[in-house]
């Protein structure tokens, strides 16, 4: 930027980034011209506003730099085109926010995110809002939540260090994914259309031995990894780790954490880059949360922390009692936010895809809890044991507080069964799904924590106004936040049956139905938090819930259709072909051996019968599945339709799958038209 625009324009963009002030038209023109010059020098021919619609993916519409004036072509890119674009937005679900007669949505440049060039196109990260200003994307509420948490966290941080002027959120997103051979992928209509296998018998061997996890990275995969890491570096994404994951053909990569907006943009970009690079290696990347039934799914663990402009990680314990007091203030504020909004936070990671993963035996539990580790738990117990914070107990607590080691050992003390775990200097929210836009979750987390921090400061202020010394007031509020948050604090095995009972006793609700969970967004308490923090208004919340429901229905509809198609077009014909072979063999047995065939062809006849049973069940169940869909589609109200999809349609799909998977075990492998789990996972 320094090289392509004037000093004044450069400074004014930086200022706009810091303060959120509007960028002046003339400055925008200058920046646009600079961007264009730079982009064309790099070989770009087109530009696009890249935005993040509510459906989860990214959207782009490419425009050429060239405009025609008469017979002459000009290269042109004005400030107006940079700052604002009007994509053909009516195709994005908006939950009723844009009536067709005013069907206008605008994408506008978000100067918080750097532009970049991908495949000859200048990509301009943008926000997407309706004509009347409502957020239609994932980015806007996230930006607002960052602002909310900055204000609330700065106010608390200043209790301990008056030099703090700004607090920002840092995140590091670990990305899990599966790789499958492209040719096999192309032979699976379900993978192509829905991202997951809707039928498929488990492979005799899958992840039992964890040999994939501990084994070397296969060379074909390593070549792919090196390639996409290089591409990622070119775009400024610093990938740090790569490794095999638990399931066969499952892998993970993680970048160095950074400021949240950049981290999320880069993660969305990374997914695009990985898929593009995979093509060159004849591979397909599966970001779906649960592409294969019965084995581990994929998450996008969100490592989250707060940092001051003075360079301090607020979730990192320190060397002095004061630093630790500050640490505990922030820690307990997060705890209380999670405790108050456990259902909302779980709802924020809910999607059709992720519902197949959550609550499984190897995935984060569907009920919220926070893991703190033994060191902190001991400190918390001690603080809670004190009846009241008096002068003496205050001094005693400070002593306890000062025993928190600067570096909490995290490797020996990690709990991978917790959906929300403290890992020494950050929280790791592990329930997030691999294909999700992390902003859909972080705006909720930021908002509820901002709300909690606001209350923290208010309560401390009330106590100090009543004459309490500050550190005593802080301790008192820490203690009260802690005792309120006990319900979500859990150190044990999150996969165990005991925890499920215990969670129920504590009144923690597990997500068992996705559309039901979406309703948490519109609960009174959620609406209060979102509106008070300025993150979303009521209309936006309602629209968002509707889009979530609609997306759920559409995705499930696709899955149900592709399942029906596969059964009718692939599974049943293959089964019948095999029956014909069996029939010929039985007939031949009879012709050659007479009555003896009853003994000789016993197994063949038995198989024939079994196949008939499953084929008949399959065709009845597919019909019933179509009926269940039709019944649901007739319902106007989106919430009720989603509800029916999540119950009757899903149940019917399970029945269909059961017969299909049995047939896979009965039919001649040479006749089976779909790549099997064994092939998809081990090739
Ligand atoms: P794991 O052992 O959980 O698999 P990884 O090394 O794969 O850990 O990923 C950890 C992620 O957390 C990385 O993206 C890393 O940059 C990020 N991270 C580290 N420290 C912080 C922090 N203070 N705030 C946010 N993210 C962090
Ligand atoms: Mg990792």
Image (cartoon, rainbow, N blue to C red):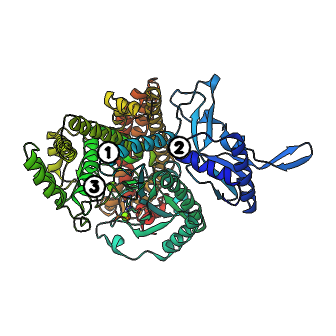
> How far across and down, in percent of the image, does residue 507 sit?
18, 37
Which residue is label 3 attached to? Answer: 421
The residues bearing labels 1 and 3 have C-alpha atoms spaced at a distance of 23 Å
The residues bearing labels 2 and 1 have C-alpha atoms spaced at a distance of 20 Å
Q: Which mark is residue 19?
A: 2
Marks 2 and 1 close (CB-CB < 8 Å):
no
- Can see residue 366? no
- The residue nearer to you, when weighing 194 against 551, is 551
**In the displayed structure image, the side of residue 379 where residue 85 appears, left or right:** right
Circle 2 SS class? helix
The residues bearing labels 3 and 2 have C-alpha atoms spaced at a distance of 33 Å
Quadrant for residue 320, please give it.
bottom left
Which residue is label 1 attached to? Answer: 156
> How far across and down, in percent of the image, does residue 504 sit?
17, 40
- The residue nearer to you, when weighing 539 against 111, is 111
> How far across and down, in percent of the image, does residue 344 sit?
33, 38
Q: Residue furthest right?
A: 71
Circle 1 SS class? helix
Label whose residue precedes the other's in the sequence (2 or 1): 2
Mark 2 crowdedness (10 Å alpha carbons): few <14, some 14-19, many ≥20: few
């Amino acid at each position: 930027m320094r090289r392509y625009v004037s000093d004044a324009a450069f400074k004014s963009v930086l200022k706009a980034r810091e303060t959120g002030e509007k960028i002046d038209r003339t400055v925008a023109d200058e920046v646009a011209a600079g961007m264009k010059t730079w982009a064309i020098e790099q070989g770009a021919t087109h530009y696009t506003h890249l935005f993040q619609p509510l459906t989860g993916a990214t959207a782009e519409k490419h425009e050429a730099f060239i405009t025609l004036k008469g017979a002459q072509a000009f290269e042109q890119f004005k400030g107006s085109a940079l700052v604002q674009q009007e994509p053909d937005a009516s195709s994005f679900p908006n939950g009723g926010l844009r009536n067709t007669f005013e069907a206008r949505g605008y994408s506008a440049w978000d100067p918080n995110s750097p532009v970049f060039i991908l495949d000859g196109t200048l990509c301009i990260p943008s926000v997407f809002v309706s004509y009347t200003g409502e957020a239609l994307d994932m980015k806007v509420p996230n930006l607002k939540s960052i602002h909310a948490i900055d204000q609330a966290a700065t106010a608390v941080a200043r209790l301990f260090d008056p030099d703090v002027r700004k607090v920002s959120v840092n995140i590091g997103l670990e990305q899990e994914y599966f790789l499958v051979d492209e040719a096999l992928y192309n032979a699976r209509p379900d993978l192509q259309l829905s991202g997951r296998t809707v039928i498929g018998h488990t492979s005799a061997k899958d992840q039992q031995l964890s040999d994939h996890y501990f084994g070397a990275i296969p060379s074909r995969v390593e070549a792919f990894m090196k390639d996409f890491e290089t591409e990622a570096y070119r775009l400024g994404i610093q990938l740090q780790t790569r490794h095999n994951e638990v399931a066969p053909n499952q892998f993970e990569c993680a970048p160095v954490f950074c400021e949240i907006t950049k981290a999320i943009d880069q993660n969305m970009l990374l997914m695009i880059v990985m898929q593009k690079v995979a093509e060159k290696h004849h591979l397909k990347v599966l970001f779906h949360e649960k592409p294969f039934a019965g084995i581990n799914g994929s998450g996008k663990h969100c490592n989250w922390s707060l940092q001051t402009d003075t360079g301090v990680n607020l979730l990192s314990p320190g060397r002095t009692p004061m630093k630790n007091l500050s640490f505990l203030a922030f820690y307990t504020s997060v705890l209380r936010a999670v405790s108050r909004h456990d259902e909302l936070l779980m709802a924020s990671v809910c999607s059709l895809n992720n519902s197949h993963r959550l609550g499984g035996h190897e995935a984060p539990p569907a009920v919220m809890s926070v893991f703190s580790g033994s060191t902190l738990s001991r400190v918390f117990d001690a603080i809670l044991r004190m009846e009241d914070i008096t002068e003496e107990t205050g001094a005693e607590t400070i002593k306890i507080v000062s025993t928190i080691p600067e570096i909490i050992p995290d490797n020996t003390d990690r709990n991978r069964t917790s959906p929300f775990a403290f890992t020494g200097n950050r929280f790791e929210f592990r329930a997030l799904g691999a294909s999700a836009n992390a902003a859909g979750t972080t705006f909720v987390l930021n908002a509820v924590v901002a709300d909690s921090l606001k209350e923290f400061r208010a309560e401390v202020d009330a106590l100090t106004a009543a004459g309490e010394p500050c550190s005593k007031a802080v301790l008192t509020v820490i203690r009260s936040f802690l005792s309120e948050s006990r319900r979500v604090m859990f150190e044990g095995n999150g996969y165990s049956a005991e925890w499920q009972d215990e969670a129920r006793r504590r009144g923690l609700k597990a997500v068992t139905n996705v559309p039901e969970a979406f309703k948490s967004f519109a609960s009174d308490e959620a609406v209060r938090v979102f509106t008070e923090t300025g993150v979303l208004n009521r209309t936006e919340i309602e629209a968002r819930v509707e889009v979530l429901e609609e997306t759920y229905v559409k995705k499930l509809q696709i899955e149900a259709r592709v399942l029906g198609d596969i059964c009718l077009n692939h599974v049943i014909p293959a089964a019948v072909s095999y029956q014909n072979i069996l029939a010929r063999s039985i007939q031949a047995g009879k012709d050659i051996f007479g009555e003896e065939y009853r003994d000789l062809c016993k197994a063949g006849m038995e198989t024939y019968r079994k196949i008939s049973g499953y084929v008949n069940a399959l065709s009845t169940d597919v019909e019933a599945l179509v009926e269940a869909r039709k019944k649901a589609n007739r319902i106007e109200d989106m919430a009720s339709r989603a509800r029916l999809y999540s119950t009757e349609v899903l149940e019917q799909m399970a029945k269909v799958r059961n017969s299909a998977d049995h047939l896979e075990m009965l039919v001649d492998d040479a006749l089976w038209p779909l790549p099997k789990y064994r092939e998809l996972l081990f090739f």
